[in-house]
Amino acid sequence: MSRVSSFALVCVLVGVAPVFADDSVRAALGKTAPQWKALAGADGKQHSSDDYKAAKATLVVFMCNHCPCAKSYEDRFKEFTSKYAGRGVKVVAFNSDNSEDIEALKKRAESSKFNFDYLKDADQQVGKGFGAQTTPHVFVLDANRKIVFAGAFDNDKSGAKVTQHFVADAVDSVLAGTEVKVTDSNLCGCKISYAK
């Protein structure tokens, strides 16, 4: 079975739709990341993009509470946060899902013991600004807030057979001051529905 076929099969088995890397997935690459102000966080505080301006690299994650694919990555996001915190890397997650309010985010962050900021994108402007399509959809920003990677965290939703560490490799390159070799990947997750 080809890599693309196996990717699609995994997505179907977990009840989510695959999104293959194309111009719409890559649209954010090379652009300066959108800014945001006064977004409510699961920690009870207000957050803005300025909170992360001193980071050497920033991982931006779009996720939600109910998506099987997003939930399967929660532990990996926490592990990444712990591993890279001492290297000047920040992690911030956004929830742009209209069906989940800030109270739902607080409960999820507490029960799952999130060690990263989890913010409510209530008007969906941050999600639209990044062009986020699924949960999870991750973006890596360099120190200048340029988007250098957009796609999936790694190449295996289950975590059992990961052979490509897209985000970790991109962040390592940013920290080393070298070119990010893999800048995008296929997505697998629940589609973000945007209000018109």
Image (cartoon, rainbow, N blue to C red):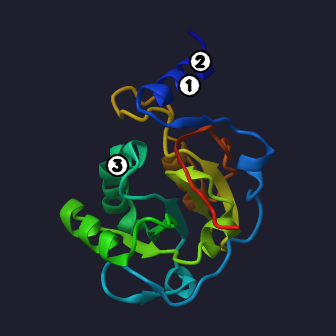
Percent position of residue 109, x then y: 28, 67
Image quadrant containing the N terminus:
top right
Viewer-side residue, 119 vs 183: 119
Q: Are marks 1 and 2 in contact (CB under 8 Å)?
A: yes
- Residue farthest along the left direction in this orientation: 111
Query: Which residue is at a point 70% across and 38% down the rendered structure image?
Result: 21
Viewed as shown, does residue 22 lie left or right of 48?
right
Query: Which residue is at a point 64% across and 52% down the rendered structure image?
Result: 150
Question: Which tag, 1 or 3, sits closer to the chain's start?
Answer: 1
Q: Secondary structure at mark 3?
A: helix
Viewer-side residue, 177 vs 54: 54
Viewed as shown, does residue 166 lie left or right of 92?
right
Percent position of residue 86, x then y: 36, 68
Q: What crowding class fits label 1: few (fewer than 14 Cα within 10 Å), some (14-19), or many (20 or more)?
A: some
* Residue under numbered circle 2: 5
Viewed as shown, does residue 77 lie left or right of 38?
left
Residue type at mark 3: give it.
Answer: Lys
Q: CA distance from mark 1 to mark 2?
A: 5 Å
Q: What crowding class fits label 3: few (fewer than 14 Cα within 10 Å), some (14-19), or many (20 or more)?
A: some
Q: Secondary structure at mark 1?
A: helix
Residue type at mark 2: give it.
Answer: Ser
Question: Which tag, 3 or 2, sits closer to the chain's start?
Answer: 2
Q: What crowding class fits label 2: few (fewer than 14 Cα within 10 Å), some (14-19), or many (20 or more)?
A: few
Q: Are marks 1 and 3 in contact (CB under 8 Å)?
A: no
Q: CA distance from mark 1 to mark 3?
A: 18 Å
* Residue under numbered circle 3: 71
Q: Are marks 3 and 2 in contact (CB under 8 Å)?
A: no
